[in-house]
Image (cartoon, rainbow, N blue to C red):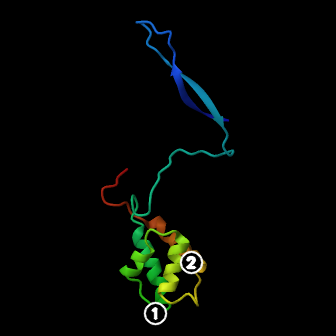
Amino acid sequence: MLGIRIPIGVWRNATPSRPPTLRFRVIAFSMAPKTSISHVIFDMDGLLLDTEKFYTEVQEIILARYNKTFDWSLKAKMMGKKAIEAARVFVEETGISDSLSAEDFLVEREEMLRKLFPTSELMPGIGF
């Protein structure tokens, strides 16, 4: 069982030689056994690691099989959408929806991205 200490007030019996102290309440919670989290990093694609280029690369590879190209106008239409919505735009705008469903596109894209992500480099200005 783990706990978080939440401040709930200041002990008022302070004297000039003893400053007031905070009182805490411990809120308990449990985690799955053998789970040890030492760090958490929140990263949006392309913020800390240069991963954005991989999306373009993978989508170009997929479209090349259909003799199609991936250009900026299509990328712009996909940006900011949920994955499934962007996938629908991808297969419909390129005219490959009869051959590749949005769901299958996502599965294939994720498999390819999973292989590329470990080769990511830090964005300029990021250092640890």
Q: Which residue is outermost to the top?
A: 16
> At 47% from the left edge and 67% from the top edge, which residue is drawn?
117
| Secondary structure found at label 1 | loop
Q: Position of residue 4 (x, y in %)?
A: 58, 33
Q: Position of residue 5 (x, y in %)?
A: 56, 30
Q: 10 Å neighbourhood of mark 2: few (<14), some, or many (≥20)?
A: some
Residue 67 badge: 1
Q: Position of residue 9 (x, y in %)?
A: 52, 22
Q: Measure the alpha-carbon separation of dots 2 and 1.
A: 17 Å
Q: Quadrant of residue 80?
A: bottom left
Q: 10 Å neighbourhood of mark 1: few (<14), some, or many (≥20)?
A: few
> At 39% from the left edge and 59% from the top edge, which residue is drawn?
47
Give whichever of 108, 82 is nearer the camera.
Answer: 82
Report if the CB atoms under discs 2 and 1 are less than 8 Å apart: no
Q: Please report whichever mark, 2 or 1, sits nearer to the chain's N-terminal start.
A: 1
In the rendered image, the vertical position of residue 99 relative to residue 52, given as above or below: below
Residue type, mark 1 in image: Asn
